[in-house]
Image: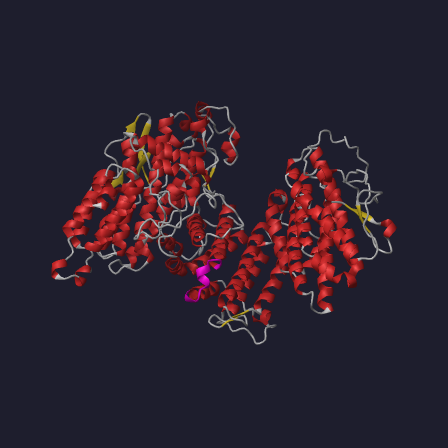
Amino acid sequence: MVVRKQVSNPDMKYKRMGIIGALRIVSAIADANAAVNYSSSQQPNCEEALGLLNMTVNSCKFVTLPLILLYDELSALFESNVLHSAIIEWVGEHVAEFDTLFLADLEDGQLSEKYLCESIEGELWMNLDGNISPVCVNILPLVSTSQQRSQACLQILPSQFLLLTTIERSGSEGSLGGINALLGCPLHLPSTKNLDESRWGSLSALEKKTVCHSLYFAINWIRELLNAFSTQVAARVDNVSQRVRDETAVKLLKRLRNLILLEILLNTLLKIYPLSLPELRYLGNYSGSTSSSKFNTGKKIEEDNMEGPSSNKRQKGRKDKAASDKLNSDEKLKQSTILDAFKRAGVTITQETKKASSRPLPSGMTSKDVESEANNPGELGHIDLMAAPVQLDMQRFKFRTLHVNCLSLLKYSEFQDSTYPYHESELPLYLYLLRDLNNKLDHVNPSSKPFFNNSQAKSTRAHCQKSTEDLLSKIQPLFSSLRKHLDGSVSMMKDRSDSSPDNWSSHSDSAGNPHIPYVMVSKSSIATSVFKEVLGCYRKLLGTPDLLNQANMSALKELLQTFQPTENFDDDLSEFRPPLVPSNVDYLYCGAFKMFEAIMDAVCLFSHILASDVLITMQSILNSIIVLLEKSGESNGKNMHGGCSKEIIPFVKKQLGLSAHKLLTSDFPNEDTENGWQSKGDLIARILQIYLRNSESTSVLLDELACLVLPQVASLKSKSTTQELSHGFPTLCSSTFHSWCRVLHEENLGNFNKMIKQALKTTSQSGVAVENVMDEIVKSVNVFVSLTNICKIHEKVAMHAMAVKYGGRFIDAFLKAFNFLETQFGQHGGDIVKMIKELQKATRIIQTICAEAKGYKRTMITSKIPATKRSMERFLFQVKALLEHCSNVERCWIGNLKHKDLHGHVVSSQVYGDVDDDPNDAEQEQMETDPETPADENDNIVGDDETENEATPLED
């Protein structure tokens, strides 16, 4: 009774609960294996189960999303349970109407008559079976006739087809031979004439929407085709021969070509005609950690950030279904993209935004302006088939999801000859699958933050069908394919010749793709993209926590074993005593590291960016070793099960540091030099971070870079190539100087915090330990002072803001060291006073920067001033307390300082005009000083016995 009320409830929240509850009851009372556990008086009641199913289907018949949910859950139920034959027969009869709803008959592979709706003419696309194809998927007529009703009909097409294929496989021992004609049948879509640049401009808004929706439903139809028929090639099916399996794989690869073309076409159209697409799978408004049902455990939704408050609205008010669906899907798009709000707020997309597709939109334009701009010829332009579909990825959560079985296509090829073992024309197929694999691995390891952010990284989280262990078991056979694609892409990038006879166009024609002249493939980018995707997959696999569990140790070994160098590398491991055992994990880790090290040396010759990506992959190997040793829990650092010793960590860190240094000091290929380093600051920062963290002594290296190397760089206003290269780091130039300074600040602060923790532990230890800690603290102070002093030369606001930000943080960290300094003052008093005087130079510069920022209203800096000045005020009182408590000589007095700028020039108090008078900072603003001028009175001065008369001021 409760389930019946829930299923009949118009609120989607309760309807969903009712659907899942009804199927849970059906699985219990109609389980074919349940009869064994029941007495004769308690036999399962199939009639009751059929009645419950019938009631559930009828209640969802006219509501699209609940019906999609019901079909998907039924499919999952049949996958996981063996139900009574009467249930299977009833569901089979229910989905038998599929061909009546969605298919149209063909005569000799052609339509009996041309379809024309207003000015939209239809034609057959992507016919793999030619003249023998008996039917086509009738998409265009359903889209163009009665928009509201046809859209709802087409929305359930993928889920109903999924249920149909599930029933077919359950009744045919896993084979889909009975519906094999659907794999190769054509699609009835708008004529390609409508995609012509001049023709597109003349279409009305309704006609453009018809074209876009037709392509969208075709995309999701093919995605479900891939899901269904990939089960025939991913695993052995007893009644499917090897010949049929190979033929099916070739057809699936052709369908993948169709899918790539359709997605890039729709992505291009959405750039110039933004449109909210209908949902083809139920999302709900619950968190991604909640499974949508007991059966479909993989349906974990992580799209709350895409929906926002609109998901709550969608659950209520179903009086006007079509309007409600449209409104909520539009609102969902607005919550998740930056191309939105033009329908609701009158905000439109400018011409510049259409090209960039990534900037905020100006207001003041109407929707009519958008259409008139879209009607201009030449809007479509040239389309790179390999470009990431940014517009589609913004709404990817609405698409049908590719199952893990589809990834098995990475092992197949359309070609049987061995003349060209790695075909350029197949790279787009592999690239598409690798991108999907990357997304699935993001879901398995949601904490992973790939360094190379691409368009799809933020827009969607691909979800897996099964648990993490099941996903790993299905991906494990693909490790060799990943290595194959890595080697093939490297070889192709090295070759860089156009002698390969195959190309995308010729094989695209064989897949039935229509000829669209402005669709092109950038040969130089295909291999590069495949290379980067493989590296991304490898990093995410190593970062998957479950892979490092003891239960998955065999998968980890296989992954490492697959990525081993072809040449013997035992000589490079000669320093280990006893020698590493080849079958152990530590040996395999070293081998994988050496392989990527060799790849980095090769790709560095033609692409510094790709070499950096390899370096980051090498860092992920080190991270995996550390996590594995932590998981082992052995006090001696030895993983007894996997054979991984902590002794390999220093070896890997040393090699990683050398590789990072090589990148920072190497000359660049012409392509990188031409593009400049301005857009690669984060990349350089990551390389520098790896270099610093894996050096023998981070503090020594920081001191060298901050005090010797950075001061050699000319002013940001100078473009002298000679000056930029004189310090030996070509990556250190005016464009990347800010990134270098930021990394040095961060690493120095992190290293200093470690020293403070160590200092607090060494107060009662030997004098040698104390001396070492004091030396490290002095080096950190020198680095901080040198980095702050750079602001005198590099006067960009970003540099000054960075000095204020990290200045406050460093002072906060230094405050923690006063207890240690107080205990050591008697023995190291002179060094401590000298160190404080050096630190005082940096605080003076920061005070001057704060004064100028307030005068010129530089908000980037002023937002950081209060916290920094509070830290310096605490520092002032700590120094006074330290000197008064530990010194017999008066080292502090009050001085009155002149107001000077960063260059030492006296500045009038009115020179900045109106200064923001913050009551919390008013007293501190009166004490801005020049670092080279001694004070007279009214400030705090730090001196020592020998140089008391030359003491320098310490401001608050």
The quadrant of the rendering that contains the N terminus is top left
The quadrant of the rendering that contains the C terminus is top right
User: Is 335 displayed left or right of 770 in the figure?
Assistant: left
Q: Residue at x 58, y 53 (%)?
A: 612
User: Is 319 displayed left or right of 662 in the figure?
Assistant: left
Q: Which residues are magenta?
A: 542-551
Closest to the observer, 605 or 542? 542
Asked if 633 appears above or below 753 in the picture, the reply is below
User: Is 159 displayed left or right of 274 in the figure?
Assistant: left
Q: Residue at x 75, y 51 (%)?
A: 839
User: Where in the figure is residue 685, as x and y percent of width and height?
Assistant: 62, 50
Closest to the observer, 558 or 124? 558
User: Where in the figure is residue 390, as x and y percent of width and height?
Assistant: 46, 40
Q: Give the dominant element type of the magenta stretch: helix, strand or loop.
A: helix
Could you tell me if residue 714 is visible in this image?
A: no
* Residue 667 is a magenta residue: no
User: Where in the figure is residue 679, as x and y percent of width and height?
Assistant: 60, 43
User: Where in the figure is residue 640, as x and y percent of width and height?
Assistant: 48, 73
Closest to the observer, 679 or 232? 679
Asked if 564 appears above or below 430 in the picture, the reply is below
Could you tell me if residue 535 is visible in this image?
A: yes
Furthest residue toward left: 41
How many numbered discs, if any? 0
Asked if 650 appears above or below 119 in the picture, the reply is below
